[in-house]
Image (tube, grey):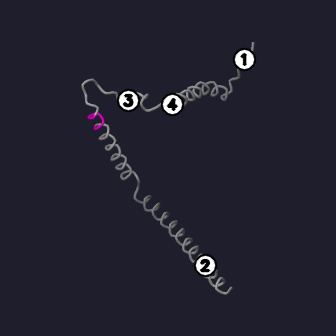
Amino acid sequence: MPSFPTDPQWISAAVETPLMALLAWMLHSLRRTIAQSPDALPPLIPCKPGTDPAQQNAALERTREDLAAFKLEVARTYVPLSLIRDVDGRLTAHLIRIEQKLDEATRAAHSTAAQMRVLAEDR
């Protein structure tokens, strides 16, 4: 009678295979749903009987604004000021280096153009 190896790789493969199949099926159904026309899709928030869809859209917009404000507050609160200063300093240094390279390239281009004009006048 054949026995299955108890190697951890076999066990993980036995568990992961159905999960990967489920993930593939979910991606396929999501792509199929997205490919449909917007009219064929069900509404994101079904309207309750007796409610105005405009009110629901306004409530949804307020919720989105509140979420954006919360994200901004989280970014302000949880990022240390020293890290922001460090990133700002590195970004400024990179931009200064880029600006210097652009200035050098511009000077070289102007110099080359001037030399070309002089050569063209000599002919």
Instruction: Mark 1: give few (<14), some (14-19) or many (20+) Cα within 10 Å.
Output: few
Extent of the magenta region: 54-58
Cα separation, mark 4 vs mark 3, equals 15 Å
Who comes first in sequence, dot 3 or dot 2?
A: 3
Asked if residue 32 is positioned above or below residue 79 in the image, the reply reads above
Q: Amino acid at mark 1?
A: Ser
Residue 57 magenta-highlighted:
yes
Looking at the rendered structure, which numbered label has been put on residue 30? 4
Q: Amino acid at mark 4?
A: Leu
| Relative horizontal placement of residue 119, taking residue 97 as reference (left or right) | right
- Give the alpha-carbon distance from disc 4 to disc 2, as whole Å: 57 Å
In the image, farthest residue toward the bottom? 122
Instruction: Name the element at disc 2.
Output: helix
- Where is mark 3, residue-wise? 43
- Of circles 3 and 2, the one toward us is 2
Q: Which residue is mark 1?
A: 3
- Find numbered disc 3 in the image and state the secondary structure of the residue it sits on: loop
Answer with mark 4 or mark 3, whichever residue precedes in sequence: 4
- Closest to the camera, between mark 2 and mark 1, is 2
Q: Which residue is at 41% across, 55% downward?
A: 80
Q: Is residue 11 left or right of residue 58?
A: right
Label 3 with label 2: CB-CB less than 8 Å: no
How far separated are the C-alphas under marks 3 and 2? 62 Å
Figure quadrant of residue 9: top right
